[in-house]
Amino acid sequence: MTKPLLDVRDLRVTFHIRREGDMPWTAPRQLHAVGGVDFTLRPGETLGVVGESGCGKSTLARALIGLVHATGHAEWIDGADLIGLTPRQMMKYRRDIQMVFQDPLASLNPRMTVGQIIAEPLVTHHPGLSRDEVKTRVKDMMERVGLLPNQINRYPHEFSGGQCQRIGIARALIVEPRLIICDEPVSALDVSIQAQIINLLDDLQRDLGLALIFIAHDLSVVKHISDRVMVLYLGKVMEIASADELYADPQHPYTQALLSAVPVPDPRIEAEKVVVPLRGDLPSPMAPPSGCVFRTRCPRAQALCAQQVPMLAGDPAGTGGHRWACHFPGPLTEAEIGATPR
């Protein structure tokens, strides 16, 4: 088995929140955005990360590249722990780990041309390249992601949302990284453009041998591009498995609810499928439920769920197999689907 490109253990992100009017000596409240996430990522693999808004997906991504303070461990393939590195120390890994952001236009500097935006990482990490070499590489990359090289001197506002996301992808790829973290890269795009961007990422990954962490809400998109899928809820891993196994045999009630919400293009199947409702709202991460964080919305919740935090069970840890954090896993019955969570 190949050595993991990235091995994450007990990753935690906590924000300290002060309310307006708090006295200086008042202790800030704690918002637990990510609470002890474990996963491994192998070279060339795509890990999909799904969950509702507010479940910690984007915070997880930002923690891995040092944009927010985190604790725990994220061991890179060379043995270095990426968590806790200073910006100067992290600079060594910026070339290997790049990110594509959610809002394609907001992530681009409106005062820079497309050529300058794509060239910026190249100039930073390869200062010895001549101006002509940089321009040649930028034009080659533009063509590779489906942009016309003669658009090199245009500004971001002259492009559509899908084209701006292609610019963001080109900027990430120009330094030949080993890992790209895609933070909901298609959520702000039309459905037809989403498919183009997903296919582009799929082709680039296959051609360049990239590893991807792909964050999204749409589980149908995640299934198409991912080798494995990790389901987050209130910053904790509910279930992780290969894409085929997770979609075919989900064990956690939350995963079952998310999958049942995915629309099916066949009207007959859509009308006959059983929908697992998610009742209530997402609890505040500043006051999460005791025990299992999903228990307040779970139709199968019992007394044990409030008393004890479920640990990831299933296939042995480190094997990359199917694992879930639930005291009572398995398919929900019709009676449970119609029940009110305790």
Image (cartoon, grey):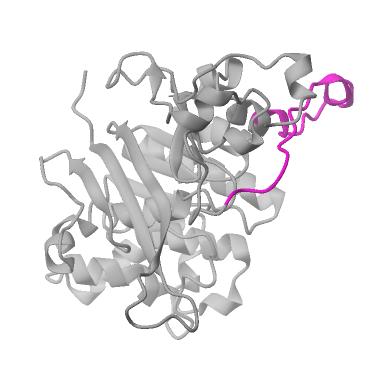
Whether residue 280 sits left or right of residue 295 in the image: it is: right
Residue in view at x 65 percent, y 52 percent? 193
**Which quarter of the figure is the C terminus placed in?**
top right
* Residue 170 in which image quadrant: bottom left
Whether residue 108 sits left or right of residue 40 in the image: it is: right
- The answer to whether residue 140 is visible is no
Residue 272 pos. (x, y %): 86, 19
Vertical placement of residue 168 versus 199, above or below: below
Residue in view at x 54 percent, y 65 percent? 103
Whether residue 26 sits left or right of residue 42 in the image: it is: right
State the extent of the magenta-drawn residues as a range. Answer: 259-283
The stretch drawn in magenta includes residue 66: no
**Which quarter of the figure is the N terminus placed in?**
top left
Residue 314 pos. (x, y %): 40, 14
Residue 126 pos. (x, y %): 16, 66
- The answer to whether residue 51 is visible is yes
Residue in view at x 18 percent, y 42 percent? 76
Residue in view at x 52 percent, y 48 percent? 55
The one of 91 and 290 positioned closer to us in this rendering: 290
Q: Main secondary structure of the magenta part?
A: loop
The stretch drawn in magenta includes residue 261: yes
